[in-house]
Every structure is written in structure tokens, then in C-alpha cells.
Image (cartoon, rainbow, N blue to C red):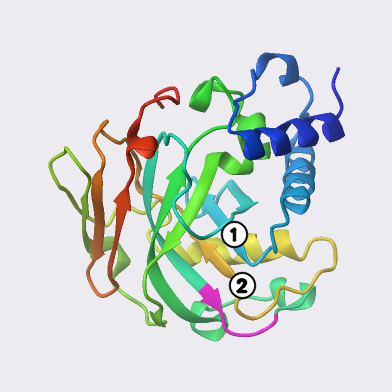
Amino acid sequence: MPSLSALAQALTEAHRTGQALDARPWAETVRGEADAYAVQEAVAAALGWTGTHWKSGGAGPQGPFSHSPVNPGNLPDTPLLGVEVEVALRLTHDLTPADAQRPLAAADVVDAMCVAVECVTSRWQQGMDAPALLRMADFQSNAGLLLGRWQPWHALDWARLDWRLTLPGQADITRRGGHALADPAGVLPAWLQHLTRKGQTVRAGTVVTTGAWAGLHALAPVPGTLRLAMAGLGELVFSLPASACSGACPAA
């Protein structure tokens, strides 16, 4: 059976070359979440990621939760499975392992928030049909994180928040609410406990995007402008190149 270090090397190469891996030879390599997180750490280190940006999400307020480092910045030049509507939060001060074990209110630890779009792809040929632990090891299928303009944190009526997503070649997607936790800040306790589990302190300015609103939104094979607007949070606008919409990745 291939080792975790061999898997980390293979995923690092997949990131660098854009060549997806066949999941079948690796299916038994990742035995649990601890293995998946170890691979994440090794690949992020090999790619030179700084650990200042993360994604976190949960199936519901009680979890289970999962976490992954992400690489923020420009839209990657790679076919995408789709995009997710998100809200990102930024920490106001350092938080120690002891801090992470205490009850935390968002207003005490978050200084800013913004609209965000997570780009989704896979380094597995099987895409979203790859085993869940392999997808977790592959940064939970993250392809990049695009952030809107930061604004001061203030609680919103998240369950009733209106938002609109405009994708090229499709009718606008308009929703009210739709976050799995009802409140994006619901990821904070589990995420901070994950980051501090080995005794590390989480630094001020660390960013976490907090999970999808209404799931994954597939792209049409048409380049153009993506626009996300969320009431009380502003908007994010960027261009989707033809390479992102080429459909070369398997459909979700």
C-alpha cells in the first residue's frame, strides 16, 4: 500500500502540473481524518502556503466539521467543478490553545468579514466521486479562494440574508439564507480547536471561509463575469476565463 508521504508527493505534483491522479491506487492509504490532515500539512508545506487562510465547514451545528488550508489569490488557470458562495471571517487577535477551549463569541474574536467565493476542483480523476478521505486530503477539493472587500464584523440575520449569484450563461441564482449552520461563525470553535490541537497559537489576521451557502454551483461552458452580492456584505465581481469553464474536470 502506498505511504502517506508518497501520497503527499503525488498530490504536490498534481498541483504543480495540473494532471489529476487516479484515486484507485490510493484508496486504502488514508485511514482516517488524522491521515488526511497529515497529507494536507505536507502538501501545503511543499507548495509554500503560509497557513494564513483556511476553509471550515460542518454538516450542521453539531458537526461533524472538517477543515483545510487554502491558497487565496487569483482564479486558478484550471477547469473547475463549480463555485461556492461563502462568508469569510478574520481574527482580531492571537488565540492560544487555552483560548480555543473556552466558549467564544464571534464579536470577541472576529474583527472583519467579507463575501467570498470558493473555487472547487479536484486533483482526482474521479472528482467528487473519489473517496471522501482522499478528497479531504486534497484540501477538500479547494482550487482557490476569492475575497470581497473587508468590513467590520457585525451580526446579521443570517437565516434571512438575501443573496444573488450571477454566473455566465445561466439564470441568476437568488436565495434567502441557506448556510448549513445558520450562522457562519458556528465553525469557529471546531476550527480553532483544530488549528491549536498541536499546541500552536493562531495568529491575528488569520482568515477562515465558513462553508457553502446552498451547495456547489456548477459552471456552464461559457466564460464571462461572476458576480456575488449579499445583503449587508457587499459584492464580489471577477471574470471566469474559458479554462475555468472548459468542463475538463468530471461533473460533481
Residue found at the very far top of the displayed protein: 24
Q: Which residue is mark 1?
A: 54
In the image, 121 versus 232, the foreground residue is: 121
Residue range of the region highlighted in magenta in the rendering: 90-94
Residue 175 falls inside the magenta stretch: no
In the image, 160 versus 211, the foreground residue is: 211
Q: Amino acid at mark 1?
A: Trp
Cα distance in 3D space between marks 1 and 2: 8 Å
Identify the mark nearer the N-term, 1 or 2: 1
Q: Position of residue 82 (x, y in %)?
A: 37, 38
Q: Position of residue 12 (x, y in %)?
A: 72, 39
- Disc 2 is placed on an element classified as loop
Q: Quadrant of residue 245?
A: top left
Query: Which residue lies at the image location 37% right of the left edge and 75% below the top edge?
Result: 149
Query: Which residue lies at the image location 76% right of the left edge and 66% below the top edge?
Result: 196
- In the rendered image, the vertical position of residue 188 relative to residue 123, given as above or below: below
Asked if the residue under mark 2 is in contact with the one under mark 1, i.e. CB atoms within 8 Å, the reply is yes
